[in-house]
Image (cartoon, rainbow, N blue to C red):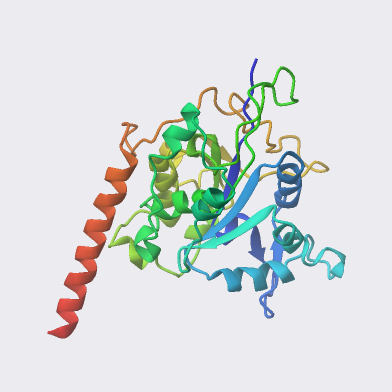
Amino acid sequence: CNIDLPECVIFYGLDTMVVPMTNNNNNNYKIKKGVTRLLKECQEVDTAAILLSERLHVEDLKIILANARNEDDGDDDDVGALMNYVNCGALHLRSSLDQIPSNKNQMLEQGEDDNNSEDEEEFNSYQFYSQGKIGISPNPASVIDSLNSVTIQPRGFGGSSGFGTQKQDPKRSPIPKHTVAFISGLSDDTNDKNKENDGNTATISRNRCSACRLAGMRVVYIEDLGLGSCTAEDLSDAIVETLGDEKTDWDIVTLDGISTPGSYWLNPPNPRDDDGNRVNVEEVVELFRKERETTVKDANKKRRK
């Protein structure tokens, strides 16, 4: 059986990686179970990892990750573990509040954008949207741009252990159908309202699930707030309580488990809306752009009155 490991995993929101410590007077954060383990797996097999935020700038993310530790017992040995992955290029920090960098020019300069494979032709149909705040969920623009901002070396076709693989393709950005997004229920446990969503009453985690589905990615929902707390059961490909710790948990989320086929699905996804209908990604992004720009213009007119 041929198994395709994920080309990229996206941690959609800071709360997918870290949580505030108890009595968090110093704004210290604890790394969630399984995060460093999964990042290590990604590093070992050259799967790209992205932390995408809609609320914090990249510089803010760096400060938080630099002080996050694996345990809240005061041991400083594990402080900055996540930034080690950032510094070595295994984890990429992106924010819709900042300009997400495109790697297109770099790839053209290196002559690495001449891939005629079927997957690459499909990927080239996606534009680099650069919509900033307008591109946040449920608009898929920002999450797609985050993919366009990193470069991977595609694996040869074949098994996850390398058996029967063929020659590798030239470097390119990850393809949405080979991308898995992690979304946390903790996004909804906050007083911060996702005001940019044009009055959308859906929860933040549900909007993020919707954006990733529209982009054509697989979605794993982390049910941090307890069993039954998932607000996007119909939009998630898998629901887990935690990424899991090898020492304490029977069931852990691994790259093999979220491969295609793997423990949660058999086939790669297509871009689809909340009702499961296939969609044209560019048309969806353009629709969001027009609606949100109109909303901003109307709001500005009201202010002037």
Q: Identify which residue, 219 or 224, lies in the foreground.
A: 219
Q: Residue furthest bottom?
A: 305
- Location of residue 288 with respect to 172 vertically, above or below: below
Q: Residue 246: image x %, image y %?
A: 80, 41
Q: Residue 276: image x %, image y %?
A: 34, 32
Q: Residue 44: image x %, image y %?
A: 77, 42
Relative horizontal placement of residue 59, taking residue 39 as reference (left or right): left
For the N terminus, the image quarter is: top right
Quarter-of-image position of residue 72: bottom right
Q: Residue at x 77, y 66 (%)?
A: 80
Q: Residue 229: image x %, image y %?
A: 50, 48
- Location of residue 258 with respect to 63 vertically, above or below: above
Exactly how many numbered labels are in the figure?
0
For the C terminus, the image quarter is: bottom left
> Can I make out residue 75 in this image?
no
Q: Identify which residue, 9 or 189, lies in the foreground.
A: 9
Relative horizontal placement of residue 39, taking residue 171 as reference (left or right): right
Q: Residue furthest left?
A: 305
Q: Residue at x 40, y 64 (%)?
A: 132
Q: Residue at x 67, y 44 (%)?
A: 243
Q: Identify which residue, 62 or 153, lies in the foreground.
A: 153
> Can I make out residue 235 in this image?
yes
- Location of residue 12 with respect to 169 vertically, above or below: below
